[in-house]
Image: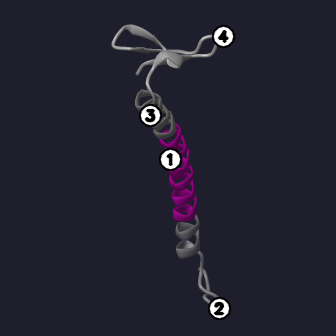
Amino acid sequence: MTEVTENAVQTITFNDKEYKVDELNEKAKYIISQISDLQQQGSQSRARLDQIEVATRGFTDLLGKELEAPLEGEVVE
């Protein structure tokens, strides 16, 4: 599945052939729905992974600052 267009008649293009969604059987429509849902989940997962990576770098920086800070009561010369 390569493309879903939004117009009066919804179509999909698969292997360079265009199909009208309303002419497909229920199983094909179900499969299209699953593919669409999986694509959305993939996008959400990529966004979540980006957030996790940024947060990990942030906490790594905080740990570095904490470990490099003088201990309480320590005299810095």
Would you say 76 lies left or right of 16 here?
right
Q: Earlier in the sequence, mark 1 or mark 3?
A: 3
Q: Is residue 25 magenta?
A: no
Q: Main SS of the magenta segment?
A: helix
Residue at mark 4 to residue at mark 2: CA–CA distance: 74 Å
> Horizontal and vertical percent for residue 74?
60, 88
Q: Earlier in the sequence, mark 2 or mark 3?
A: 3
Residue 1 in the image: above or below residue 18: below
Q: Mark on residue 45?
A: 1
Q: Amino acid at mark 2?
A: Gly
Q: Where is mark 4, residue-wise?
A: 8
Q: Residue at x 54, y 70 (%)?
A: 63
Q: Mark on residue 35?
A: 3
Q: Residues within 10 Å of mark 2 (few under 14, many from 20)?
A: few
Q: Amino acid at mark 1?
A: Ser
> Horizontal and vertical percent for residue 32?
46, 29
Q: Mark on residue 54?
A: none
Q: Nearer the viewer, mark 4 or mark 3?
A: 4
Q: Is residue 59 magenta?
A: yes
Q: Where is mark 2, residue-wise?
A: 73
Q: Quadrant of the C terminus?
A: bottom right
Q: Residue at x 53, y 75 (%)?
A: 67
